[in-house]
Image (cartoon, grey):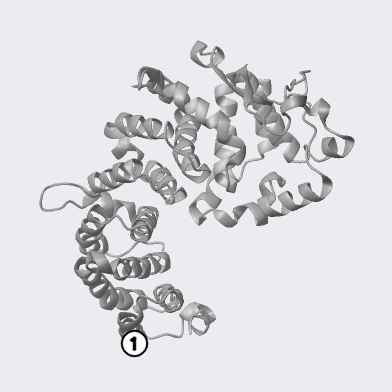
Amino acid sequence: MSVVLEIDKGSWLSPDLAQSLVLAVLEVWAKNNKDPLFLSIFTDIMASLAGSNAKGVYETVVKLSLPTLCTAIANAKPDESWIAGSAIDLISSLIGGAPETGLGEGFFALLAPSLFSCLEQTEDRDVLQNGVSCITLIIRKDCSQVLSWSDSSSLSGLDHILKLIAKLLQNEDESGGLVIGDLIIHLLRRAGESVLPVLPELLRAMAGRMLTAKTATFLQSLVIPFAFLIHNQADTVVSLLESTHVQGRTALDIVIQTWCENAETFQGFWPTRISTLALSQLYASPRPSLQNLKVKGDIVVKPETKNTPHEFTSVSFPVKVLKLLVHELRSGGESATIPGASFEVDSDDGDEEWTEEEQQNQGFKEDEFAFLSEMLGPRGANFDNDDILYESDDDDLKKDIVSQINMKVRLLQQRGS
């Protein structure tokens, strides 16, 4: 049905027909909300209905479905978390199909009480992930509704979101990974000035969580917001991190160490770009706190322990960043030689012990390297290979200036400045 609804972007729909379809979908959903196959079909249908170009259809779809779905979220029992999770998923479909003009008056005011109550009480991973994704969509589509709403206790929508972020940062389950990072990024992009009063405490909490984070996706979700802030206000953010202490270390030390160790594992077109741009800005900074900082370098592989490397060199932060930037230039298909400069980045990784075949394939056999390349996907693809690298980014980030600039030119300019 969703395929049919997408014909001519649903311009042929009428409010009456949309009403009949919505009521039918909700009836079937109520009886099958535990079935992931049905849910996938329902979300596609609701997104197509909400995205119709026909006059009055979006308003009709929201008016009929949103109250029912909010009631389902509010009444879902703890042992029936799939009801809340699927209802939130359907609401996200409505938001995704909403017009550029916004969600419509009263949308968030109707949703917020049941949604925040559910997310504050639940520990279910899927419900939390669905809820964070839903809130992120709302911030992207109509952030003003979030900022203007408050509950009966005078807690604002932003207050509730910050409470949710704090909860997720304290959660030992890191499977939420990128969803919390996306939420923080879009919150900073859309409501930066409103977040300013609580930004120091938020950054402190994020830096503290880096000390115990284990998974690559979760670490990326913690680092990328810092990269975004540094790209926009480098001196201010670095000064704040210098003056913030967590467990006897400066937040700057924690963030930089984590960033350098994980930068090459970051996924997504926009995140890898913002990370590289921010690192290049820090590389050019004369601050002693950055120039004198030591970070983890290459793996030290000795002939007798070649298969079990466990030692790392220690290098200065600027040298580490230089290596990362050279890697980015090379992965873009260009020579790493920067005009007006001559440098060699030494390595202590023991590659002199590799065979000729291993040297040609980064330490792997040819068939091993081919397998890893296929599994890892397009991480090393050309900077401007948009069709490949855009797939994991949302529309807002695709349109962001960071996704449009010529990275090779920018890095060379940064080096020359």
Q: Residue furthest left?
A: 152
Please determine whether, in this image, residue 103 is positioned above or below residue 150: below
Residue 83 falls in which quadrant of the image?
bottom left
Query: Is 194 left, or right, of 236 in this rendering?
Result: left
Element type where label 1 sits in the image: helix
Please determine whether, in this image, residue 167 is positioned above or below residue 75: above
Q: Position of residue 124 (x, y in %)?
A: 32, 58
Residue 338 in sight: no
Residue nearest the observer in this picture, 317 or 247 = 247
Quadrant location of the C terminus? top right
> Which residue is depicted at the point 35% across and 39% down?
192
> Which residue is depicted at the point 50% across and 45% down?
217
- Return the residue at label 1: 24
Residue nearest the observer in this picture, 272 or 103 = 272
| Label 1 packing within 10 angstroms: few (<14), some (14-19), many (20+) | few
Residue 297 falls in which quadrant of the image?
top right
Residue nearest the observer in this picture, 185 or 340 = 185
Q: Position of residue 109 (x, y in %)?
A: 21, 60
Name which residue type carries label 1: Ala
Query: Is 73 left, or right, of 153 in this rendering?
Result: right
Please determine whether, in this image, residue 107 is positioned above or below residue 287: below
Q: Position of residue 392 (x, y in %)?
A: 56, 54
> Which residue is depicted at the point 37% across and 30% down?
208
Query: Is 344 left, or right, of 77 in this rendering?
Result: right
